[in-house]
């Protein structure tokens, strides 16, 4: 089972990959990064993508099933205000942001602890394959082992 460094190397094999990172969306810190980053600063990019990931995973507008049919605090549901953390199976799988020169694919990683980690892949728009990137990121996220 691959760790952070191996997963990042696998992400860079995706056609058009410019850079990749594994980020903790609770703290906004990059756990690992490889290649280029938008703006040239890994930590700034990690913090900015973490904000986007938090919105998608915790806001009911993006993840309406986050509280489930039994309501907040019900069986298998988090307490109010805890968002997607604590739920088996995050309600959001991935996010795609399209810019004029690239694609940003953010794939959430389910972990045994609090599932607050995601993979961020930055693709060149001209040479990247968005469909392949989504499939590859799903595979990498599923096999990622954080120790």
Image (tube, rainbow, N blue to C red):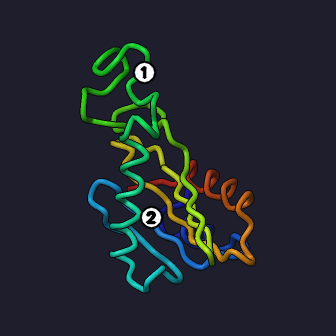
Front tag of 2 and 1: 1
Q: Name the residue nearer the viewer: 134 or 141.
A: 134
Q: Tell me the number on the disc at residue 68.
A: 1
Residue 123 location (% of width, % of height): 63, 72
Distance between mark 2 and mark 1 Cα atoms: 28 Å
Residue at left 35%, top 23%?
A: 77
Q: Is residue 26 left or right of residue 37?
A: left
Dot 2 alpha-carbon crowd within 10 angstroms: few under 14, some 14 to 19, many 20 or more: many
Residue at left 51%, top 64%?
A: 120
Q: Tell me the number on the disc at residue 16.
A: none
Residue at left 43%, top 15%?
A: 69
Using the image, determine if residue 70 lies above or below residue 111: above
Which residue reaches farthest bottom? 40
> Dot 1: what SS?
loop
Residue 85 location (% of width, % of height): 34, 38
> Dot 2: what SS?
strand
The residue pinned by badge 2 equals 22
Using the image, determine if residue 63 lies above or below residue 137: above
């Amino acid at each position: 089972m691959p760790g952070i460094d191996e997963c990042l190397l696998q992400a860079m094999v995706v056609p058009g990959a410019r850079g990749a990172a594994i980020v903790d969306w609770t703290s906004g810190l990059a756990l690992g990064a490889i290649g280029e980053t938008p703006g040239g600063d890994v930590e700034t990019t990690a913090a900015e993508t973490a904000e986007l990931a938090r919105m998608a995973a915790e806001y009911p507008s993006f993840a309406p099933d986050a509280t489930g049919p039994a309501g907040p605090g019900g069986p298998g549901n988090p307490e109010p205000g805890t968002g997607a953390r604590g739920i088996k199976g995050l309600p959001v799988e991935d996010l795609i942001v399209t810019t004029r020169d690239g694609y940003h694919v953010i794939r959430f990683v389910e972990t045994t602890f609090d599932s607050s980690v995601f993979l961020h892949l930055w693709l060149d728009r001209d040479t990247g394959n968005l469909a392949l990137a989504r499939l590859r990121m799903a595979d990498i996220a599923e096999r990622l082992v954080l120790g």
